[in-house]
Image (cartoon, grey):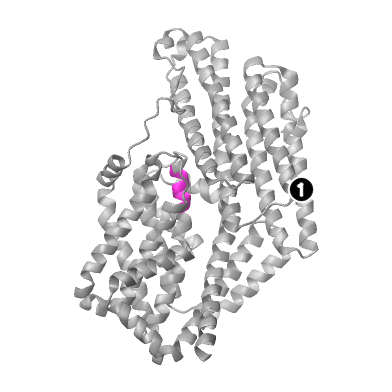
């Protein structure tokens, strides 16, 4: 009976530790989610910058798994080249070790103050960044309390025969220890939590250094599995190069670490004992893997490209169909070809939005992967249109042709931006809805169906406007912004009412639903900018005293 009580207590504190990590992750992601993703995407221009970006983002959200899933999503959308993506993953793996280093100094005394400040921020602020940061502070305080309780709990277990024999068996089987730790990390989605548990075992002498280090190797392997399994699949093997490449570096490092464990006695002595020794080994392992792979990322990327070749599809939507190089000599023909190619973007976006609706309302991960694939194709096609027009001989263009070229660029750019907002916003929400096991209520689902149908209608209007230039239709499309603002305002009122009545779970879902509506409004704003505003601006109808509501 005593053993059962200890086991339940242990499980409860582990659950509290995982929940604290979860609250920190979700709090930071809610506070900075979209801007964090946009900044991260822009900051990964070179391998060195990408490495630093992955390190900083992981240190902020306390999860290399979450960072890996974001990078994988960018790769699926075609927004991140392979070499910077792999470098960012190496940085993310180093970033998670900084968190462990901080926890090794046992900052438990900070926990009450963090929880107090977090609860005050959560209770006294409306839904927004400050409230979300309060949630992160509560999670950090709970994490520190759980760690302290686990350390206390392990003290009387030092002489427990069952635990001692189990850990002794694992000491003699490092491969099994690595596999057990990898499976636990994969299941918990948190290498930080698992390494903290290993530190607790080592602190009380329950896990000798050889076993503790083998378990750390397993935690590093397990954290690379989730981006492979959960990063989405668009049917193109090339889209899996970043997560598979990261898993390859983890496997190579883990195998090398296991092979060197029997000769690592002097290293163990130099790293120190107990929790600090585990934290130091965790940091040293990831720095070593990064140092080994950063100089050879380009040949490693070529190997991945050979192992995971791009899907050869003669009907690849990213391939231009109308951009004829020979048409450049006749500007009117070249601009007409570019306009036809720009209109293809609306067809791709229409299908992407249809698949996004399936991902949101039916929780269909395959539809989400296909939508990401189409969004990536839209981005590539927009770049092709921009390059084609940018290299057109400007001196051969009349004033009317120059204006038409500008309108094509504006239309193509905004349609591609609408795909980016849909991919990073709506598809990201679909993934989160599935992972959190949330369910929209009947009113929200019905309203969302209407919102997505309205986006499809506005997209058709934008395409028609691009061809016709009808000012009446342009005014009607411009005022669609007001409709989406009204929808968001009504949803915000319902959300505040749920908070006042104390329905916390429903309030979480309604806050999430508000984010969906905001991103749907962002997609609609791109459609208005693409087709309606250029026409109205051309006729002087976007002055402050006109169409004020639609600006």
Asked if the magenta segment contains residue 72, the reply would be yes
Viewer-nearest residue: 340 or 414 = 340
Magenta span: predominant SS is helix
Q: Residue at x 62, y 16 (%)?
A: 467
Instruction: Identify whether 478 is placed above or below 299.
Output: above
Relative image position of residue 43 (x, y in whole percent): 44, 46
Position of 541 compared to 215: left or right? right
Viewer-nearest residue: 235 or 298 = 235
Position of 343 compared to 205: left or right? right
Instruction: Identify whether 325 is placed above or below 165.
Output: above
Crowding near the residue tagged with mark 1, few <14, some 14–19, many ≥20 C-alpha atoms within 10 Å? few
* Label 1 secondary element: helix
Relative image position of residue 22 (x, y in whole percent): 55, 65
Residue underneath mark 1: 443
Q: Is residue 458 visible?
A: yes
Q: Residue at x 46, y 17 (%)?
A: 322
Q: Which residues are magenta?
A: 69-75
Relative image position of residue 539 (x, y in whole percent): 70, 18
């Amino acid at each position: 009976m005593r053993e059962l009580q200890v086991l339940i207590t242990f499980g409860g504190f582990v659950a509290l530790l995982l929940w604290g990590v979860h609250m920190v992750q979700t709090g930071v992601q809610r506070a900075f989610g979209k801007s964090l993703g946009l900044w991260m995407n822009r900051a990964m221009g070179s391998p060195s910058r990408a490495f630093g970006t992955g390190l900083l983002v992981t240190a902020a959200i306390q999860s290399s798994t979450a960072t890996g899933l974001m990078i994988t999503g960018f790769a699926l959308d075609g927004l991140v080249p392979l070499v910077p993506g792999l470098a960012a993953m190496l940085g993310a793996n180093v970033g998670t070790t900084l968190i462990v280093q901080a926890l090794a100094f046992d900052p438990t005394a900070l926990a009450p103050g963090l929880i107090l400040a977090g609860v005050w921020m959560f209770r006294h602020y409306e839904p927004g960044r400050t409230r979300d940061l309060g949630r992160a502070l509560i999670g950090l305080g709970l994490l520190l309390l759980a760690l302290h309780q686990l350390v206390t709990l392990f003290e009387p277990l030092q002489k427990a025969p069952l635990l001692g024999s189990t850990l002794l068996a694992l000491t003699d089987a490092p491969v099994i220890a690595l596999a057990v730790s990898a499976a636990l990390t994969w299941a918990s989605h948190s290498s930080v939590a698992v390494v903290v548990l290993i530190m607790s075992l080592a602190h009380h002498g329950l896990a000798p250094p050889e076993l503790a280090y083998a378990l750390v190797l397993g935690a590093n392997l397990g954290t690379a599995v989730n981006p492979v399994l959960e990063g989405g699949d668009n049917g193109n093997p090339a889209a899996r190069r970043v997560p598979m490449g990261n898993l390859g570096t983890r496997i190579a490092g883990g195998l090398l670490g296991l092979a060197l464990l029997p000769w690592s006695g002097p290293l163990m002595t130099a790293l120190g004992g107990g929790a600090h020794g585990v934290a130091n080994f965790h940091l040293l392992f990831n720095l070593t893997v990064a140092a080994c792979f950063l100089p050879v990322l380009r040949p490693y990327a070529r190997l991945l490209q050979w192992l995971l070749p791009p899907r050869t599809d003669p009907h690849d939507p990213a391939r231009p169909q109308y951009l004829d190089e020979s048409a450049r000599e006749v500007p009117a023909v070249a601009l007409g070809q570019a306009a036809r190619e720009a209109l293809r973007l609306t067809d791709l976006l229409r299908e992407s939005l249809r698949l996004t609706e399936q991902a949101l309302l039916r929780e269909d991960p395959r539809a989400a992967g296909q939508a990401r694939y189409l969004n990536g194709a839209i981005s590539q096609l927009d770049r092709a249109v921009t390059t084609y027009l940018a290299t057109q001989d400007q001196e051969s263009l009349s004033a009317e042709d120059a204006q038409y070229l500008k309108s094509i660029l504006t239309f193509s750019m905004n349609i591609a931006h609408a795909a980016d907002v849909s991919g990073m916003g709506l598809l990201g929400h679909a993934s989160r809805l599935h992972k959190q096991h949330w369910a929209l209520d009947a009113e929200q689902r019905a309203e969302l169906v209407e919102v997505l149908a309205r986006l499809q209608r506005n997209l058709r209007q934008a395409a028609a406007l691009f061809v016709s230039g009808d000012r009446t239709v342009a005014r009607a499309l411009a005022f669609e912004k007001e409709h989406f603002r009204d929808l968001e305002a009504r949803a915000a009122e319902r959300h505040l009412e749920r908070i006042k009545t104390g329905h916390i779970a429903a309030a979480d879902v309604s806050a999430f639903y508000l984010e969906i509506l905001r991103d749907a409004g962002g997609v609609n704003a791109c459609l208005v900018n693409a087709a309606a505003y250029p026409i109205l601006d051309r006729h002087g109808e976007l002055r402050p005293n006109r169409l004020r509501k639609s600006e």
